Image (spheres, rainbow, N blue to C red):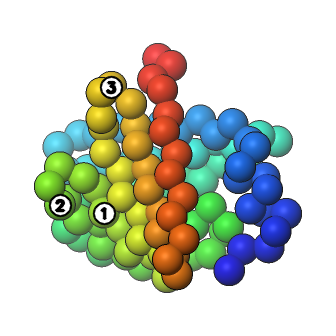
């Protein structure tokens, strides 16, 4: 459902993801090239106001399933976990799977 220019930008851009965890409370910030930043603050199991990287706002409940953070967004499902010291994010929408693996920089 994203325009082709947004898809291409997602393939080629370097996104810095900052995750701060305090128990079940998280602040998840993504810094995009050009200065755009998206921040979602949530508590596992509690409904929160969220924003997609496309800028759409909605309410969602992030769950913990088998050690993964899982969020069902309006048009896709997103999972995040730490594997081998790397952040692995998988988004699935209409049978299309997008996987991003990030290395720790700090």
Give the vertical position of 41 relative to 88 (above or below). Answer: below
Seen at 48% across and 26% down, the residue is: 103
What residue does disc 1 label? Answer: 70
Residue lying farthest front? 95
Mark 3 vs mark 2: which is more N-terminal? 2
Q: Quadrant of residue 61?
A: bottom left
Q: Quadrant of residue 22?
A: top left
Q: CA distance from mark 1 to mark 2?
A: 7 Å
* Residue 83 located left or right of residue 64: right
* Residue 28 located left or right of residue 7: left
* Residue 62 located left or right of residue 49: left
Label 2 sits on a secondary structure element that is strand
Q: Is residue 72 visible?
A: yes
Q: Quadrant of residue 54?
A: bottom right
What residue does disc 3 label? Answer: 85
What residue does disc 2 label? Answer: 65
Q: Position of residue 82 (x, y in %)?
A: 30, 37
Q: Please tell me which residue lies in front, 68 or 40.
A: 68
């Amino acid at each position: 459902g994203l325009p082709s220019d947004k898809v291409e930008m997602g393939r080629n851009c370097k996104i810095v993801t900052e995750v701060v965890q305090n128990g079940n409370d998280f602040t998840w910030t993504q810094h995009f090239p050009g200065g755009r930043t998206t921040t979602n603050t949530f508590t596992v199991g509690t409904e929160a106001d969220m924003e997609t990287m496309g800028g759409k706002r909605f309410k969602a409940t992030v769950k913990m399933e088998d050690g993964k953070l899982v969020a069902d967004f309006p048009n896709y499902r997103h999972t995040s976990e730490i594997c081998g010291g790397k952040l692995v994010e998988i988004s699935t929408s209409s049978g299309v799977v997008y996987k991003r693996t990030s290395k720790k920089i700090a």
